[in-house]
Image: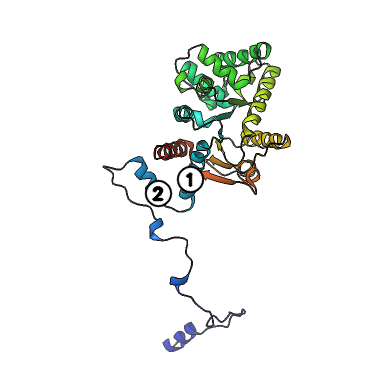
Amino acid sequence: MPLYSLQARQTQRTMSKYIQIDVTGVKTISIKGRKSKVTPKDFAKPLDAKHASFKDFADSLPHILIADELRDLVNDIVRARKNNNPVILMMGAHVIKVGLSPLIVDLLKRGVITHVAMNSAASIHDVETAMWGQTSEDVAMNLMDGTFGMSKETGDFINLALTKAMKVSDAGYGETLGKKIVAMKARNRSMSILAKCYELGVPVTVHAAIGTDIIHQQATMDGAATGELSYRDFKVFVNSIKDLINGGVVLNFGSAVIMPEVFLKALTVARNLGYKAKGFSTANFDMIRQYRPQMNVVDRPTQKYGRGYNFTGHHEIMFPLLAAMIKVQLSSR
């Protein structure tokens, strides 16, 4: 085949079945008059590694999206305490397992956190850390031979304390454990959230779901005591929630189910009783975004009258960052 004939075939074009719009009439505008969301003043700033303070680091973060939302949340927290509004920390067990108790204790001593509400797994890790200096067993290994969750000391400490308290006091779950840790002079009580709350008179509540925790596997478990003391704590929690009026902050760290559900019910009870618990901020911190915290912490409680935040990241990074930014803000006032 002649070369020119082959070239002709290769360059031959076929007509498309579809009609393309004519864009020659598109109108453009000048970027100089266009509204833009980002300018270089919003960009992150390099740090002087030799002389930078944490404040310098916080100030170096870009003024864009989540970095600015984190600043806004810090401002909400500091403003809440300045105006004597509550700052309530709801938390799951992972927060303790990744070593954040000292930071929470520090914020408690500084008067930043006014109530701690935790699931009962968190109370287990707090007790084990305070009493024996270790927690977070190897679940996969111990599950193989049926010893997972069978630590006698843990079950006896918590279950027997709850059973006794139901008979001799009107204290709830969190107060009972905090009081016992202090009374027994646990060697690591300085790191115990339960103990520090008890010492400071800051409400600490434990919200149990029966069957979810290792102490429920043991013969010392008393369902009536566990349920009663957890219910007492629910009412203590409602008493704190009722004060979220025109200010205050609720933080949810690492609880995807229990605390978002308890919070929504507690808020409903407070409003049902006539308390105007509206106009506050909420923030959910977790490693992934999930439906329940989004709805029950971020969106529904703040609709029309507040602001909800959602931060995604590992607790062992996000909580130290938040705590340090709060302390910097407090020190500058």
Q: Which residue is mark 1?
A: 70
**Labels 1 and 2: the sequence-earlier one:** 2
Residue 175 seen in the figure:
yes
Quadrant of the drawing holding the N terminus:
bottom left
> Is 22 drawn above or below residue 41 in the view shown?
below
Q: For the view shown, which residue lies furthest in the left direction?
A: 50
Identify the secondary structure beneath mark 2.
loop
Q: Nearer the viewer, residue 240 or 156?
A: 240
Relative to 178, does residue 3 appear above or below in the rendering?
Answer: below
Tell me if 109 is positioned left or right of 232 in this view.
Answer: left
Q: Residue at x 56, y 29 (%)?
A: 116
Amino acid beneath label 1? Leu
164 displayed left or right of 50 = right
Give residue 158's position: percent from left, percent from top.
59, 16
Query: At 50% from the left edge and 28% from the top edge, which residue is drawn?
Result: 96
- Extreme right residue here? 272
Q: Position of residue 43 (x, y in %)?
A: 39, 55
Task: Name the foreground residue: 13 vs 293.
Answer: 293
